[in-house]
Amino acid sequence: MRRRESNKTARYRIRRLPVLLLAALVIGLVGSTPASVTGDELSDAIARQKALAQLLRRQKEEVAALNAAQADLRGQIASTKGSLHEINADLTVVRRQVTNMVIKIEEVQATYDSLVMQLGDLETQMMRLTNEEMAKATQLAQRKEMLAERIRQAYDADRTSLLETVLSAGSFTDALAEVSYQLDVAHEDRTLAEQIMHDQEVLAAIHETVTLTRVETDKLRIETAAQKVELDARLVELKEAQEALKVLEKRTQRILAEQKASYARLAANKSALAAAIGRARDAKASIAAKIDKLIEQQRQRGNIPSEYNGTLEWPMNGTVSGEFGCSPFPYYGPGHGCEHFHNGIDIVAPYGTPVRAAGDGRVAYIGWNYADGYDPAWIVVVAHAENLQTWYAHMQPRYPGGIQAGSPVHRGQIIGYEGNTGNSTGAHLHWMVELNGDFENPRLFL
């Protein structure tokens, strides 16, 4: 009786071997992957994730830098537009601004091109990762099917049990060899299950990378499209600014050509030109003394403040044909280290355009400027303070509104009309600002 129970127990234990093997497989599926199975494939997938995250950080930095550059470019273009359309644009300043715009747009274009290239790289990488994910998913499904088939075969009713193998073996050695073979097969099943676990981890890492790449690619695609719209708008504005600059340059060049022709005729007799410059120098000193005397009289009467509290404004709108500073025209005398120095700004507008006071003050002088010799110009000098006067030359010989020396005037009040009196090459206003006895650039006081 005891012997029969012992054989029954043995049979039960032998039959339990496949069940124990299956339990081992289940434990392997839910447990951690052994170090022997974790290979370079998972490490590579994780490394790609880290590399992609670093790439995306750099891209975000580039997008932020591009946004800042676009904002800076918008500011530059707005400033250039303002300079082009402001009263009496400074051609030198506008040229420099347009040049800076071109340089800035080239920088923005280069950054944008880099962004487009990165977008292409991301899309290529996403396609490669998607294909890799599909291949890994197919491989995982095949291995799962292989494992399932092995488990089904292990429990197939037609399969010889371990007990029958032992009992039917011709010798103990044969039985041991057969059992060892079946145990080896179970070990392969466990290894396959562990490989499936490893594949699942790799697939999860690849899928996460694909998802991140797809999301960031979509974001970058939207951002790139927005940057393209922004850049195209700036390019249109640049073209408009360049065209406006060409118009301004052509108009100024035409006026300068007329002036040069007039100066060339005057310079034909160099001795006469030198004498004219000498006479003008002496006459300017004489009229300056007269103006100083009139200003002093007004100061003593309390009609002129000691200091001017405010800024000046343009006396007339038009095209600036001559800036303050060194000039190529030989008629101008030396000054400020230049052989020929222009002590004011020339503004060209239609003949008869009203000329207005640049600020509040009193008329210190109105009449002919005999510093011009036999062909004097009509000028108005307004004293805004003891040390600050504005000069308006080459105007028509009128007394608008009955103003005369000593008359108070207000900012914007008409004090004359553009003319062509004196040594003038055409209708224009020569506007000067005198501070502490020296003529300064009028633009500094606007």
Image (cartoon, rainbow, N blue to C red):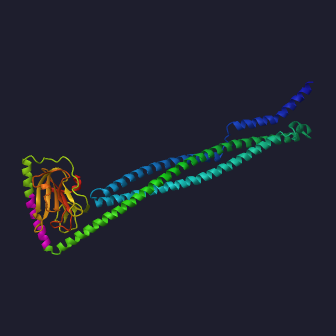
The residue positioned 18% from the left and 46% from the top of the image is 309
Q: Picture coordinates of residue 368 (x, y %)?
A: 11, 62
In the rendered view, tell whether residue 130 sits above or below residue 32.
Answer: below
Characterize the magenta stretch by its predominant secondary structure: helix
Q: Residue 415: image x %, image y %?
A: 16, 56
Please tell me which residue is depicted at 69% across the width and 41% down the height of the picture. 197
Looking at the image, is 19 positioned above or below residue 122? Answer: above
Q: From the top left corner, tell me how far across and down residue 300 is, in percent.
A: 6, 48
Instruction: Choose between 386 and 413: the one closer to the eye.
Output: 413
Question: Can residue 184 be seen in this snapshot?
Answer: no
User: Vertical placement of 204 versus 78: above or below?
Assistant: above
State which region is magenta. 272-288
Taking the image as shown, residue 386 lies to the left or right of residue 89, namely: left
- Residue farthest along the front direction in this orientation: 401
Choose between 363 and 106: the one closer to the eye.
Answer: 363
Residue 286, image x and y in percent?
7, 61
